[in-house]
Amino acid sequence: MSTATPVLSARPLHRRTTAENSPQNEILTETARRQKQVLDRLQKALNDKNLVIIVGAGVTLSATADASGKPLPRTTWTGLVRNGLDYILEGDYLDASNRRIRRAYEALEDNDKAGLLDAANIMKDLLVQLRQYPTWLESVFGSLHQDVRHPAIFDVLKALHEKGAILLTTNYDDLLERFCNLRRIGRSNMDDILKFKCGDLDGVFHVHGSYQDPNEVVLDSVNYYQVMQSDEVQNILKTFLEFKTVLFVGCGSGLEDPNFDALLRWASERQKNISNRHCLLIRNGDTLNYSPLIRLKYGPDYQDLAPYLNTLLGDASQPATGAGNAPTSVSREYSNITERSVASIADLPKRPEREPLRFDFAGMNQLNSGTRLGNQTNLASSETSIPKEPARQALTHHDYTVGWICALAIEMAAAVGMLDKRHDSLPQDSRDHNSYVLGQIGPHNVAIACLPAGVPGVTPAARVASHMLSTFTSLRFGLMVGIGGGVSSQENDIRLGDVVVSQPTKSFGGVIQYDFGKTMQEGKLERTGMLNRPPDVLLRAVASLQARHMMEEPALSRYLSEMGSKYPRLASASTFPGTEHDRLFKAAYDHPATEVTCANCQSDQLITRTERGDNIPAIHYGLIASGNQLMRDGKTRERLRSELQILCFETEAAGLMDDFPCLVIRGICDYADSHESKQWQPYAAATAAAYAKELLNIISATQVVQTTAIHGGE
Ligand SMILES: [Zn+2]
């Protein structure tokens, strides 16, 4: 055996020497030189007390292990969610046959982002309901410090902090402050945050909360909404991105969370004309790419992180590793970890990669028009060969200021039917899977996108909005336009074909997210989120329109008939179906499950309402409830109405809550009960689209331009 060994090892050695001057080696050298340059700049920032380090879940993951050296499942994202669900079952709080628990486990198995988010939302929601949330958090993180088996990373972070680095973390655990002997700074004390920002208070700032303050933990969509609405948090992070050099350590996919995603986008746009300086440490094999962060590879293994960070301290005994040649003596048990790390919900539906934030679309025109347009399938591109108006100055993506999103083909058709002019479509980045119809309403250039056929819901809506924002970077606001289920009452006499417009109240932004299954099951509403308040320019326009409609007839009917004459095939959408088909049953009277239509439903169960003098759609302003499932139950509908004065149910708007400020406009096609009929859908889609058109027509182009673009944030 011993004789064979030298022969086997000789060959690779020989190869290595002959390849010394290959072009590949020169590339490596050049890469190493650049990385060294970045390191030098980081070191300077540290010496100038300008370095901010944001510590993510990768740090906890690399520092901890169980007794046998294996990573702790609960320090990964799926592991944490599973832990919460197991906690509920093992504590006999709920039975394994519980529908929501089952759904959450199934969603976890899907192993995609949407599934994980659903599971997390259910898990958190159940734990809160069961009054176990703080106890569970404590059980997960309270003794985590006992599992720290590789504390070297904390030693380095501590040393960096002592040299002046500011420490923030997105982790819920207390390892960083515990091992660095620092105090924890939370989000709820504004004075602390302000002092921390200006350097008067030393500690570790928990951007996404700590398990010791369950209220601050950012785990579900509602929490993200809160942190993104927090002026204090946003200000401090923006200040650091603006005036300091930020180094993300162990953050990885955590940057995909809505909070950092939006912040990085903000920074990217704002600092587009200055060279990038914020950095992201990644493992050699990782392909994460978050503009505008410079990627620094610290080595092939999580355990290489600490030695690499050591080089920042200027410690000559620890060689700078650069890409590919990190110390390898430490254990490699972590290299098999492929699960996402926890720190935050890193897995909200987002476009797959960040980038490109500043596209040269004019240049792409030539590059991409052949390939990309060939892939588009629908209405958006099929009609592009016919110029919609005489070619004047070619429009670019930047000329579009209004994003219009709809969910159904009939809604898309109604939207297009409302355009004053159609525009040629533009080439688009292949990562944007939306199909757009472009055009003009009044002075505004409008980009219309529709959810994929047959896939309505909160998550697809979020995806469409996110793609739209990445392609149309000058959008000022959005409109979510389509059909919805009306909630008629004494106070709000809503009829089919009427329009409901989301309007903020004192406590809500206009849309309430209500589901994740609970509503159907227990009939009790606990809201789970809310939509951003629409931008002021829209709210002002809504107010003007309300005032105008007190004196004048809405323009809706005119727009409907114009659409009907322009597109004869949309005649059914532009025609009022008739009051005899508008039947509202008593809430407690369920539609017989065996009947397809309401022809045999008991007419003595109808609610009698006085005839309206005309067929002009009425417009109602108030709260809209949004969830993944259609509301199809009269009793639940009534309960939610009495609790929150909801006017309408729909299934998409909640997906836009994170970063697509928009107004939701819904034409009423049914009464959100079991007496479902599709008869009113085309007309309801058209009245909603007509309202959107009337609204856009009273907003001037100047008002829009003066509004902050969604994408840039500034
Ligand atoms: Zn019926």
Image (cartoon, rainbow, N blue to C red):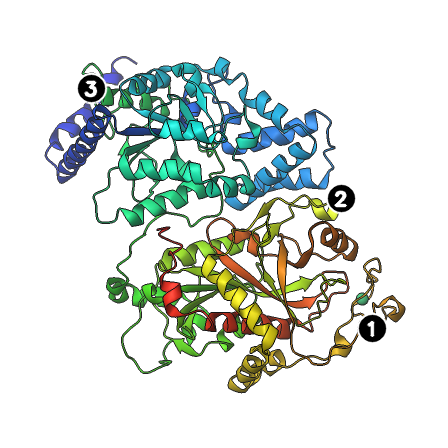
Can you see residue 650? no
Q: Residues within 10 Å of mark 2 (few under 14, many from 20)?
A: few
Q: Nearer the viewer, mark 1 or mark 2?
A: 2
Q: Amino acid at mark 1?
A: Ala
Q: Secondary structure at mark 2?
A: helix
Q: Which badge, 1 or 2, is on the more N-terminal residue? A: 2
Residue 548, percent from left and from top: 55, 73
Q: Residue at x 54, y 70 (%)?
A: 545
Cβ of mark 1 under 8 Å from ligand 1: the answer is no
Q: Mark 3: give few (<14), some (14-19) or many (20+) Cα within 10 Å.
A: few
In this orientation, which residue lies closer to the viewer: 597 or 461? Answer: 461
* Disc 3 to disc 1, C-alpha distance: 82 Å
Using the image, determine if residue 627 lies above or below residue 192: below
How many other residues sit within 10 Å of disc 1, few (<14), some (14-19) or many (≥20)? few
Classify mark 3: helix, strand or loop.
Answer: loop
Residue 281 in which image quadrant: top left
In which quadrant of the rendered view does residue 45 lie? Answer: top left
Name the residue nearer the viewer: 307 or 604. 604
Q: Which residue occupies the foreground of this view, 37 or 277? A: 277
* Amino acid residing under circle 2: Glu
Q: Residue at x 33, y 20 (%)?
A: 157
Which percent across, then down, holds residue 78?
Answer: 53, 34
Q: Is residue 426 left or right of residue 464?
A: left
Question: For residue 522, which numbered disc appears in the image?
Answer: 2
- Secondary structure category for the residue under label 1: loop
Location of mark 1 (residue): 599
What number is the disc on residue 314? 3
> Mark 1 or mark 3, which is nearer the start of the sequence?
3
Q: Position of residue 666 (x, y in %)?
A: 60, 65
Measure how far apart labels 3 and 2 are at the Cα level: 60 Å
**Direction from residue 532 to residue 86 in the image, left or right:** right
Q: In the displayed structure, would residue 570 be above or below residue 126?
A: below
